[in-house]
Image (cartoon, rainbow, N blue to C red):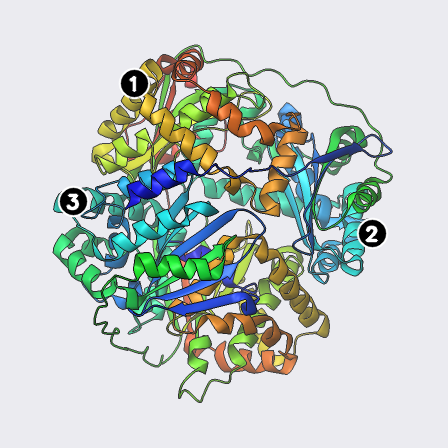
Amino acid sequence: MLNRLLLLLLLVPVNALTAPAIQTWQTASGISVYFVETNQLPMLDIQMVFDAGSVRDPQDKRGLSLLANSLLDQAADGMDADQISFEFERLGAEFGAQSGYDSASVSLRSLADDARLQPALENLHRVITHPDFIEADLDRQRNQLLVALQRNQQSPSDIAGEKFLAAIYQGHPYAYLNEGTAETLAVIERADLVRFHTEFYTASNVMITIVGDTDRAGAEAIAEMITRDLPEGNRPGPVTEVKPLTAAATISIPHPSSQVHILVGQPGMRYGDPDYFPLYVGNQILGSGGLVSRLFEEVREKRGLSYSASSYFAPRRDSGPFLASIQTREDQAAEGLAVLQKTISDFVEQGPTDAELVAVKKNITGGFPLRIDSNKKISGYLSVIGFYGLPLDYLDRFNDRVTAVTVEQIKDAFSRRLDTDKFVTVMVGPVAPSATGPGN
Amino acid sequence: MLKSILAILLCLCSTLAGAQVQEYVLKNGLKLLVKEDHRAPVVVSQVWYKVGSSYEYDGITGISHALEHMMFKGTRKHGEGEFSRIISENGGNENAFTGDDYTAYFQTMEKSRLPISFELEADRMRNLTLPEVEFAKEIEVVMEERRLRTEDNPNAFMREIATATAFQTSPYRQPVIGWMADLKSMQVEQLRDWYRQWYAPNNATVVVVGDIQADEVHALAKKYFGPLKKEVIVPPSFRPEVQQQGLKRVVVKRPAEVPQLYMAWKVPGLISVRGENAEVEAWEPYALEVLSGILSGGSSARFESRLVRGQQVATSASSGYQLTGRLDGLFTVGATPAQDRTVAELETAIRQQVDELRENEVSIDELQRIKAQVVSSEVYERDSAFFQGMVLGTFETVGLGWQLADEYVDRIQQITAAQVLTVAQKYLVDDRATVALLEPLPMDEAATQGPTTKGDQNAE
């Protein structure tokens, strides 16, 4: 019955899957705004994305960007955290502050009626433009980060992730946690926060996304309103480049867990990478296809070795990590690692089969409507398109570019971009301590 | 295993515009709920079975979840792995989750693909093959899942023991993933029995939300699910929790870095408002929901404001309340002490907050804040078709009826400060409480001296 069904579907042309119409302009002070109007729900999602992620941390003060971002709503314009949060929450608005490697952002979700929206926007404007950075708040937030860092050390997964980043990025800002370290957090002072905010939370250094129930004029007014009196500032300079690995490294960290967490990988790709589509489509076959991928098949379905088995490229402004991972009990760790390595190297050497590529293209293109089926998801795409400078028709052309990828392109891209002979391997769990290569 | 996520999602935000939901019942007893949402050309399809860990008994804990895994291992018509391959080739997202009171399977797909989901789900509702060789591998995967989520996670390990301590006779004491010993002794024949017993149209609810027409979905359901045979369903025997006779305390020692406190009070859920249980007023569960919002429904709520920022005795503290269970559940508080503060100090501080709720009415500002948040959430959650399906499926499957979800916002709006005071006095008392604490043991000597660090794990 299903075969007949599939046949029927092939005969029906896939309905025109239109990507959302993105409107874009610059505010009076030159800030780029990306706007999608959706009127079905009376709500709005607004993000302000600053080029103020941890790549902007001074070397000896790692964690500064995260602290500055998380302290914005703790005191502003004479209001304390109780007053600021109550002001959002009494309106039913949701404020968020997010800090990553490349960017730091704030977000607001609010009902669209002016009685609720306008005071919420005022409050957003307040925390962005006039944070007070009170000493006591800094001390408290720092202590919280120290507890978080300490807690990471009881999680084999967190330890493995931390060691992996340190080993593949070798001193680049991507090598560190956004939280910094106990040592670097200890020396951060209020003056550092003020300086960081003055330098990076500026009109030259921010883009805005707006999705929801307003029109162009309304969106323009919102953008002007929340960015008024942001100082012009300057574009920050480039960040040092990620360097490719020069030799393989294996790092084993003993931990009193029952499983060994096994991670392998290297620096991967960037947004706008010329190899983006072959690497993305190829990895969907290798390890990211949900319940269907080579790694899932080899590690879990055939051998029952691990609950999760996956690989991903996490693109960033510079090369984000390529990471493949599994977790398995002590006596299966060697087998698990061998299967993981062989599955990846087979794929890098031989590429996918024609049938695999056909299937994955159906998966990606057939699932396209799911990528943009909510305001939240559209908002996410806008910030990536805007912050990383992807073309405005990125979503419109997405399916065509996936369809154009060939087996040869995937094979070529994987063999050029993944150097399995120089992979970093991290094992955390009931293992003997050892370390080889420059990962030390 | 989405249990904890669900608890969060359903806290203070579960509601639906019920008027748009269409209900159908097929001749074989299958219930179909359809909610049209035309915002995007996408459809979410969920099949909910009335079975979960609270249906289990000693010796077979975890069997519902293990069976969930095996549901991807093939039928007579579609062999091992074919289900997922077909969904994948149709661009679908799919997975499944097991809770105390339900096991559910879902696909999100472009709207024209709904028949594919129905055909496959109907097939595996009655025709699963459960091959021995696949089970032998998959139970290993489940044990790895347990190691990953529970054994090697000190906080989760402690919460599992705390829950088993709080409940003495209620099946809610059993972990969804099951005790390791039961997983090790589990046999595929037991799964075959479990499958035959619970997987039938008259024990299932199909929930569809998306860009579809309700009557067309009904026709599709009749076509695919209609021919399935009914089963005689014997509901699980009702074993209520015995009345607790005093505070319970439990200490869990485990290699860890940071201590953790967990407090749980036995409280009624919406389920206890129904039927003959006259001791629970209809508004009480909603008052408990508001109470949870007073403590941790935002950054201005009391825990953040007073314990994290004011006294700085906690780095984090949050409350949770299980509104929608098949049986009465828990009101919980989980908290982590701040640096240089002890768990004892933290417990004292939380108890002070609970005492205050029992002594004084909450402020009008706090009540209004929670009510505004509920009104907004009702709109925000409609940004997710999947979430809307979750709410319908949960209410229906635990036996509350999906219609009740529709009352949520109004019921919360009617709660008064006096009612919040009443439920605090009635339920947040020591004779209903369990206090659990994670007491960190030193991490293994070898583990504190990794080769890439010189003695200090925090250094790069």
Secondary structure state at the residue bearing disc 2:
loop
Q: Position of residue A62 (x, y in %)?
A: 61, 30
Tell us which disc is closer to us: 2 or 1.
Answer: 1
Q: Chain of mark 1?
A: A
The circle on residue A78 is: 2
Relative vertical location of residue A228 with respect to residue B296 in this rendering, above or below: above
Disc 2 residue type (three-letter): Gly
Disc 3 residue type (three-letter): Ala
Q: Give how far apart the Cα atoms at labels 3 and 2 are.
A: 63 Å
Relative vertical location of residue B419 with respect to residue B454 in this rendering, above or below: below
Q: Residue at x 26, y 58 (%)?
A: B64
Secondary structure state at the residue bearing disc 3:
helix
Q: Which residue is mark 3?
A: B136
Q: Are marks 3 and 1 in contact (CB under 8 Å)?
A: no
Q: Give how far apart the Cα atoms at labels 2 and 1 are.
A: 61 Å
Tell us which disc is closer to us: 3 or 2.
Answer: 3
Q: Chain of mark 3?
A: B
The circle on residue A346 is: 1
Q: Answer few, some or many: residues within 10 Å of disc 1's Cα (few below 14, many 20 plus, some between 14 and 19).
A: few
Front residue of B364 and A210 = A210
